Image (spheres, grey):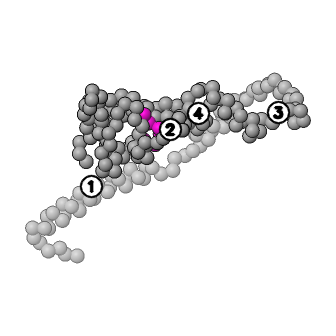
Amino acid sequence: MKYPQGPCHSSRSSAVIILIKTLVPISFLLNGCGEVPENDLRAWMSEVRQQSHPVPVDLPPRPGLEEFHYQASGRMDPFDANKISASLTAELNATGLQPDTRRAREPLESFPLDNLRLVGNMRRQGQVVVLVEADKVIHQVHLGSHLGPDMGKVIGISEGAIEIEEMVQDAGNTWAKRRARLVLQEKR
């Protein structure tokens, strides 16, 4: 095959030369990766196997297990629901922490704390009153007011926040106090 003579002829022949110079050493390297005789390795492994002799370890005999036959007659049932609930009631009464469920609920107790927004505070007759927005309605809140679904009670008022103490019930039906804070926010 005859290639036309021109400016591309020299670049084409140099590319062929580079390709040949690259492929020839690679082919020699790959020929060197042929099968390696494994006879030396197999001979060494069989020699090591013949020289090593495992020694059995003597373990002490297992102690005998005595059988136990459960007889429920005359014994207390550990899964009796009445006894469990009585135990929980006694435990609840022991802590003494109980919410006042007879108290009349205040309007802000129907809103989660996330939906309440502290918009400001003012002093009225020597007492600090906080303005809280809920559902686009402004409510006046003072010390002792209740808000939030977890029986939250306002226990502290500062310049830009109010401190709330909530009563929550844990998995064991015991009541615990938890602190929350409502902070003054810019207009949403």
Q: Secondary structure at mark 4?
A: loop
Residue designated by label 2: 103
**Which marked residue is nearer to the observer: mark 4 or mark 3?**
4
Q: Residues within 10 Å of mark 2 (few under 14, many from 20)?
A: few
Q: At label 3, which amino acid type do we have?
A: Met
CA separation, marks 2 and 3?
Answer: 41 Å
The answer for how far apart the CA atoms under marks 1 and 4 are is 83 Å
Which residue is disc 1 drawn over? 21
The picture places residue 9, in percent across and down from the top left corner, at 14, 67
- Of pointers 2 and 1, the one earlier in the residue sequence: 1
**Res. 112 in view:** no
Q: Secondary structure at mark 1?
A: helix
Asked whether the viewer can see residue 24, the reply is yes
Which of discs 1 and 3 lies nearer the camera? The answer is: 3
Tag 3 secondary structure = loop
Q: Which residue is mark 4?
A: 174
- Which residue is drawn at the image coordinates 70% and 37% (left, top)? 85
